[in-house]
Amino acid sequence: MNSSRSVKRSSIPRTKRGVLLAVLFITISFIIWTGITAQGILSSMHESSSRSSNAAIVLGAAVEGEKPSPVFRERIEQAIRLYTSGTVRNVIFTGGSRNEAVPAEAYVGRKYAIEHGVRPEHIQIETKSITTQENLEYSLEIGNREGYRTYTIVSDPLHMRRSMKMATEMGMDVVPSPTQTTAYKSRSTQIPFLLRETVMYMAYTMKGWK
């Protein structure tokens, strides 16, 4: 009887230790994965291609009334540079609106681009998307309809890694063209955006595992 009780008593701490070690291992692994993901985003944020493409896909961002926000303006101007240089032949503006009183991001992008020299017939828009994945999915629908085969993705540098991963997994022939400057200049703005992109990238990766 005594030996049986001794075995039971000694097995309880071992079980607890096993659980604690498992939790510790998972926690450390998650921290390492987070660090590697963040480093990957940082290391690829300035990767850019000069390849010619049928169209630039400008990923949507916030608007301020009928004007683009500073973040969105940087993306539009990058697309204008690509168009003016002949690197892309067409521009696809993406992004809808969560509020009927606010114009869709794509409309604002189109208006700004036309005012700065992009010919209206070279612009396509989609106004249904809310997320990055929807930006790309609806852009691909436009591309299939218009006969586009190659694309250049335009977005903020910290947003490029996740955007490129999504587009590639959709089977799109894409290259990156991050904005030359960014509204996220200070650490107080860069760090929250980096943390958000890290979490979003990891969430997208885990979704793909299902």
Image (cartoon, rainbow, N blue to C red):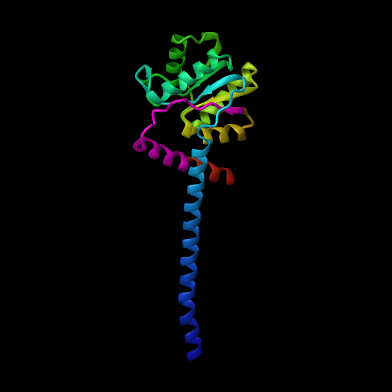
91 or 134: which is nearer to us? 91
Q: In the image, is 192 to the left or to the right of 32?
A: left
- Residue drawn at (55%, 11%) of the image: 122
- Residue drawn at (59%, 28%) of the image: 175
In x, y percent, where is residue 41?
A: 50, 39
In x, y percent, where is residue 15?
A: 49, 72
Residue 210 in sight? no
In x, y percent, where is residue 194?
A: 43, 39
- Residue drawn at (48%, 86%) of the image: 6
Query: Does residue 107 sit above or below 60 in this rendering?
Result: above
Q: In the image, is 80 to the left or to the right of 101?
A: right
Q: In the image, is 174 to the left or to the right of 33?
A: right
- Give the magenta part as a residue range: 174-199
Q: In the image, is 168 to the left or to the right of 190?
A: right
Residue 194 in sight? yes
156 or 101: which is nearer to us? 156
State the count of labels.
Answer: 0
**Residue 182 highlighted magenta (yes or no):** yes
Q: In the current view of this chain or complex, which residue is farthest to the bottom?
A: 1
In x, y percent, where is residue 165?
A: 57, 36
**Residue 160 highlighted magenta (yes or no):** no
Displayed quadrant of residue 55 = top right
Query: Does residue 114 sit above or below 53 in this rendering?
Result: above
